Image (cartoon, coloured by chain):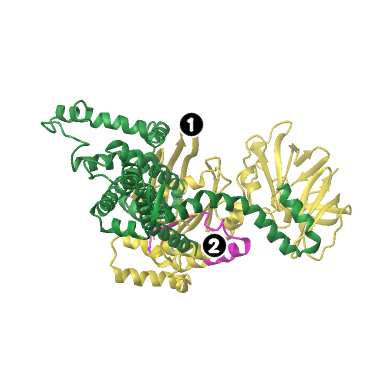
Chain colours: A yellow, B green
Amino acid sequence: MTKVTFERVHKAFGAFVALEELDLAIRSGEFVSLLGPSGCGKTTTLRMLAGLEQPTRGTISVGDRVVNELPPAERDLAMVFQSYALYPHMTVAQNIEYPLRKRGVARAVRREQVLRAAAQLQLEALLDRKPRQLSGGQQQRVALGRALVRNPAAFLLDEPLSNLDAKLRAHMRAELIELHQRIGKTMIYVTHDQLEAMTMSDRIAVLDQGRLQQFDTPLEIYNRPVSLFVAGFIGTPAMNLVKGTLKADGNRLVFDAGGLSLELPPALVRRDVLREGGIAVVLGVRPEDVLLATDGERATVKVVEPTGHESIVFFDLMDHTVVGRVGPDVRLAAGEPVGLTLNAAKLHVFAAEDGRRLNADLQPPATQAAPSLVA
Amino acid sequence: MTNAGATAQAIAPRLKLSTQYGLLGALLIAPTVLIFCAVIVYPLVSAIYLSLFSIYTPTLKGSWVGLDNYVALLASGEFWNAFWVNVVWTVGTLVLQVVLGVALALLLHQNIVFRSLARSLILFPYFMSTVVAVLVWRWVFNDLYGILNHAMMWMGLMSVPLDWIGSMPNAMISVILVGAWKYFPFVVISVLARLQTIPDHLYEAATMDGAGWWGRFTDITLPQLREVLFIVILLRAIWDFKEFDLIYLLTGGGPVTATQTLPLLVYKHAFALNEMGGASAVAVLMMLFMLGFMLLYFRYGRATES
């Protein structure tokens, strides 16, 4: 069991800063996803841990050992590449056996370990095939097998599911979770797919432009995103974000956005951030927190996207497009007038200037009233 | 094209669509077939035909001798000597070309300074006309004023000048060296092109799996180069086997017949001994040897397809 630690790790390629002062402590046996859009530094982070890139400065440790100066092979880490990187001229068995062969493991022991890894991944029938004779999912499993057979301290996975079709991806996701539960090793998983990160991880590190935005459990990240970027990046459909002004009016807290005026729970934001004359903010509300209510504010249905188990609905609310999700039994048609309210317990407020979260984040009372919408 | 289209249309009502397509196809490949017959089949058949005659080259008149030319050749020491010389030259120069070519391709694949310049310069020998190249090399090898002898004596590597072209085994070594120098760029560009397509991920995976630089070379690079090396070696073997101008210009086949390969023997029979029949017979026998290479090529092609 091995923890992995990044301390003030910085990486620059010439003038381009790929990763800025990263501090990250991954616990032993944890499944951690590095999540972010392309170019956010997540793959660079993984490659530095693997030893395929050198950090400009900072310390990387595996267990209690600083690995900065260790060659990749001596870090006791196994990596699964996005392209799988299977050796094309070797059979499945030879591919899985390769890291053992390079470490001078005796032939009989190798054979036994290959068979055990193959059994774990249902590859027994494919051992004599070449990689090009395998499907994407099978190649993926061989790549996993090659990592597994080494019994490494931690697994590094670089977008391993991105080359698979949607159905297979869901299947392999479940297999990976199951594998992690079974072997209990530290796994560090790079992905740009928030669904993968949310469903598989113990904790997620969200990165943007080389900076760590938030490192927390999937639910915490979903419910309390620390920045506008995290709020917009996590969740499908994305969180509704409305720019406006937030003003304290005596004991009331009022949000104004060109024709749309909302009274928010007074305790929603920290008092110290409010200024005379109001501050520019972005109000965030998740689609499931946009609620249909007969006495709510008047809105019009623009588009309905039924998915079977629910429908994604685009509403026009005072010239703002707001996305909501409704149950499969709710029948709505484009142009239909409806009433909307927002779930006051689940509103997010971010500063417009730097995107930081302004919520007071005291556990809101369960009986909080819905905000009244004043046109 | 227009003719073929018009013809196809004119007979269209009477023929089935598949027949029309078949006919059109035949018309379209007809020019290629005709050219192929004119430049390959006709010379080939006529060479075989000529080899059955005793022909005096200047007048091209001769008499039917059947297989006598072949019988005489196969019984002559000169033919087998030429064959042996041919094998030594081909194997020698080919090995040098491949080793040198692969080594330089690996070097040029690295991030070295002046890489683009080096990549262009390396092609220079291949582009140079053989006549010019050989004249320069003859000057380098010259036993009286050649720079090679001068340099080696200056460095103290030898005390008396060597005859690089006029004595054995120096002449064979010289021919092999010049051949390797002239043709290794072909190996370099073919191998370099393949090297550039090997994904970096394979090397990174091998590095993480514990392979050192030698392990990465033998486990990743060499297996990935296998196919291109097979083709390159086969093509170069065929081209080297029938090489004429380089050897003829450098040594003329000498000293005596020490570097006289089969193509030089063909030339000698045709234009020095004025026996076009005998020359054709040597050429036909040479073709039979090369057929071996061709069969190998086809077999390999079929193996990689399946």
- Secondary structure state at the residue bearing disc 2: helix
- Secondary structure state at the residue bearing disc 1: loop
Which residue occupies 86% across, 42% down?
A: A375
Residue that numbered label 1 is attached to: A15
Q: Which residues are magenta?
A: A149-175
**Within 10 Å of the Cα at label 1, are there few (<14), some (14-19), or many (20+) other Cα atoms?**
few
Measuring from the top left, give residue B62's x and y in whole percent.
Answer: 39, 51
Measuring from the top left, give residue A104's x and y in whole percent.
Answer: 28, 62
Viewer-side residue, B261 vs A108:
B261
**Residue type beneath disc 2:** Gly
Measuring from the top left, give residue B296's x and y in whole percent.
Answer: 40, 60
Q: Are marks 1 and 2 on the same chain?
A: yes
Question: Would you say residue A101 sits in the magenta stretch?
Answer: no
Which residue occupies 37% across, 32% down?
A: B113
Which residue occupies 46% across, 44% down?
A: A23
Residue that numbered label 2 is attached to: A136
In three-dimensional space, the C-alpha distance between marks 1 and 2, rounded to whole angstroms, equals 38 Å
